[in-house]
Amino acid sequence: MSDTRTAQGTRDRAGRVVVRRHAEVVAAAQDPVLFSSAASAHLQVPNGLDGAEHARARRLLDPFFAPDELAWLAPVLDDLAAGLVDDVAGGPFDAVELGARYAVRAQSAWLGWPADLEAELLDWVAENRAATRSGDRAWTGRVAARFDRIVRGLLDARRAGATAGPAPTGPERDPATGPDVTARLLAQHDDGRPAWTDEELVSILRNWTGGDLSSLALCAGVVVHWLTEHPEHQRHLRDAPDAALDAAVEEILRLDDPFVSNRRVATRDTVVAGCPVAAGEQVVLDWRAANRDPEAFDDPAAYDPEGHADRNLVYGTGPHVCPGRLLATLELRVLVRRLLRAGTVVHDDARPAERETAPVAGFRTVPVRVVTAP
């Protein structure tokens, strides 16, 4: 993020104050009264909402991510990951591309989307990353509109078919496929009325998928690259308990956070990071910088999953903490474990890893191979 330093502190090229210190980022993220999350010109449900609207949305949507609601998905994800890893185990592959393909299949399985949508979604992920990388707002707008059309088509197909009732439980729930999450979302009611407008439904599904498809691919690239750089950790993580592997993955993501920043809007005149900020001005919470702040981490570059867990901001903090954290954690755990159990992951000597360019973080490509024991 390019910025300028003035007598009033650090601002980016758009004139927004950039908050980098861990303590100041946490303070802003945990104060939704002073710092509104309604920073986008587009509807963002739930995390672009504030106050009672945000609380209502989280009340209705958070149960979709509860551990018991995701339990059916773990073996499905494992089958998906096993198939993908088997496909690439014989030669070099790109960990970011593998992550994107896995993300599309995982999200489609969770949401009940058709498998024949994979090629279109993969193409969208690639174009979305390219548009974001370019900084061309017109292009990113077209890419967003393209995804909205995909979502609206899926919603129309649901309405044309069978409607869903309450979440299946017990013997009514198919352990192989789970509930149709998209149909359940369509059928949600609140106070006797449909819970969501069409615009809100598109926003929710865009938030659940559009962002997560690219994010999971970036996370896969970061984690796999770190593992190739630190092969001594691969053996013990291969069979580590779930909680230990989850903590390791989150620490790796803290060390090289692919989630760059979020915006907030000051609701009144205040001072942020030593800079005067007027009501209505945007500020930028720099998660990457906060996750490497030496005031919060004695040695920010050290790998310490247990010691750093309570200050790790990969999934944010405060009332707008990432609602899909448990799902993302499950997806990454399953993929990383399948890769490690296939053998030792090493760099592909023929091609070096290529970093993403701002405003995107992480890697554009991570060419690797899996070396199996004789």
Image (spheres, rainbow, N blue to C red):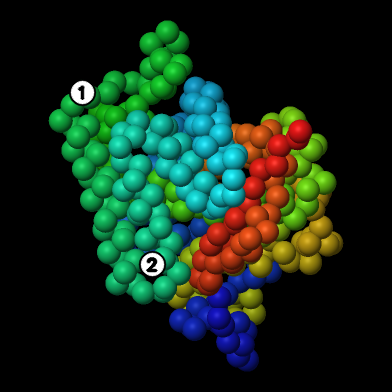
The Cα atoms of the two marked residues, 2 and 1, are separated by 36 Å
The residue depicted at 49 percent of the width and 83 percent of the height is 13
Find residue 64 and report its image quarter: top left
Q: State the residue position of label 1.
A: 162
Q: Which mark is residue 131?
A: 2
Residue 67 screen position, x and y as percent: 55, 28
Residue 26 as seen in the image, left or right of residue 113: right
| Residue shown at 59% from the left, 45% from the top | 91
Q: Residue at x 65, y 55 (%)?
A: 348
Residue at the extreme bottom of the image, as rendered? 7
Q: Amino acid at mark 2?
A: Ala
**In-image side of 217 versus 121 (left or right):** right
Q: Please tell me in which quadrant of the rendered image residue 229 appears.
A: bottom right
The quarter in which the C terminus is drawn is top right
Element carrying mark 2: helix
Q: Secondary structure at mark 1?
A: loop
Whether residue 91 is visible to the viewer of this picture, yes or no, is yes
- Front in this rendered view, residue 236 or 12: 236
Q: Residue 204, percent across and down?
A: 35, 45
